[in-house]
Image (cartoon, rainbow, N blue to C red):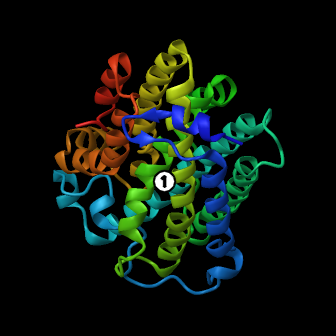
């Protein structure tokens, strides 16, 4: 457990760090009050609703592009269905990486500590989220959309060699942008009830995960050696670059009858899409800047990703 002396010694631009065990205890209490079993919480047998979107149209990659304006409403809604499945597929890939990073983080730590118990609780949450996303994909009749083999193998490298601060920086990257989109989705009555239910569960439980990762990244950036902080900046920037590319799976365009090259080109040129992604990353990039992650090469990589304004 962190002592009072250690706690007082750990300070960053955001102030004194909170006691690690106290943070974990609060998160465990929250988990006991606000955790969900998607198998029983959601009505998986209910019919899909005619005329409802599977993702808010403003969050669909081609929204407000010349191609979008030429598409019939039915084709737009079909693209939203496929993109919801692609984002869920991306979420599963990322959560599998995250679970392995968390296991590595606690491997050498006291197994009876609240910090470890919360990490195990979060891993259980992520298991449920992954199965929930998979079930949603299947229920909506969409195909799965695995990430490109290159990104799949880069993820393999990350989960194998990432240092602790790099692991938590990457965790926040994957969690906070998706969380932004889901916070816009679950209250949107234009969207399918099932999709709204899935995003609501994920938002509630991910709030704890973000808190845990933020507190630990702050602690790690204050206490890690200089070389590890520099490596974290570069690896986080590279992860941002990869994630921004992986967030769009070009196969969705082919599957709804669009020209893949034209669609990808228009997404890359879309000011609206750039604003959506930067808005989704804004809270995270402000935090990373405050704790010293967005510096040097890492900052340049973030800018090249399009996620940093």
Number of marks: 1
Give the quadrant of the C terminus: top left
To which quarter of the image does residue 206 belong? bottom right
Q: Position of residue 96 (x, y in %)?
A: 67, 45
**Residue at 70% in and 48% down:** 115
Give above or below for 104 relative to 300. Answer: below
Give above or below for 271 relative to 294. Answer: below
**Residue at 62% in and 25% down:** 163
Q: Which residue is mark 1?
A: 87
Give the quadrant of the N terminus: top right
Residue 62 in the figure: left or right of residue 255: left
User: Which secondary structure lies at badge 1?
Assistant: helix
Front residue of 240/191: it is 240
To which quarter of the image does residue 301 belong? top left
Q: Position of residue 8 (x, y in %)?
A: 53, 37
Q: Position of residue 225 (x, y in %)?
A: 55, 16
**Residue at 66% in and 40% down:** 2
State the residue lying farthest toward the front: 5
Q: Is residue 135 visible?
A: no
Q: Position of residue 102 (x, y in %)?
A: 69, 41
State the residue lying farthest toward the top: 227
């Amino acid at each position: 457990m962190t002592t009072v002396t250690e706690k007082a010694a750990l300070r960053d631009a955001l102030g004194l760090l909170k006691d690690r065990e106290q943070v974990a205890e609060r998160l465990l209490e929250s988990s006991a009050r606000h955790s969900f079993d998607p198998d029983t919480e959601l009505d998986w047998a209910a019919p899909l609703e005619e005329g409802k979107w599977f993702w808010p149209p403003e969050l669909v990659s081609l929204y407000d592009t010349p191609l979008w304006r030429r598409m019939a409403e039915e084709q737009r809604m079909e693209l939203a269905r496929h993109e919801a499945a692609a984002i869920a597929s991306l979420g599963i890939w990322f959560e599998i990486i995250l679970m392995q990073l968390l296991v590595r983080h606690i491997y050498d730590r006291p197994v009876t500590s609240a910090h470890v118990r919360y990490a195990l609780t979060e891993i259980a949450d992520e298991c449920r989220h992954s199965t929930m996303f998979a079930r949603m994909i299947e229920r909506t009749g969409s195909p799965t959309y695995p990430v490109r083999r290159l990104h799949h193998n880069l993820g393999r490298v990350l989960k194998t060699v990432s240092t602790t601060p790099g692991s938590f920086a990457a965790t926040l990257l994957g969690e906070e942008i998706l969380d932004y989109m889901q916070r816009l989705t679950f209250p949107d009555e234009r969207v399918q009830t099932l999709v709204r239910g899935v995003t609501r569960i994920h938002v509630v439980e991910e709030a704890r995960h973000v808190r845990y990762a933020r507190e630990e990244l702050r602690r790690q950036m204050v206490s890690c050696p200089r070389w590890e902080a520099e490596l974290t900046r570069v690896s986080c920037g590279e992860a941002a670059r990869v994630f921004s590319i992986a967030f769009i799976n070009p196969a969705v365009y082919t599957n709804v009858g669009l020209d893949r090259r034209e669609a990808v080109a228009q997404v890359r040129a879309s000011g609206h899409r750039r604003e959506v992604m930067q808005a989704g990353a804004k809270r995270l990039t402000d935090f990373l800047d405050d704790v010293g992650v967005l510096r040097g090469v890492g900052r340049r990589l973030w800018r090249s990703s399009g996620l940093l304004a």
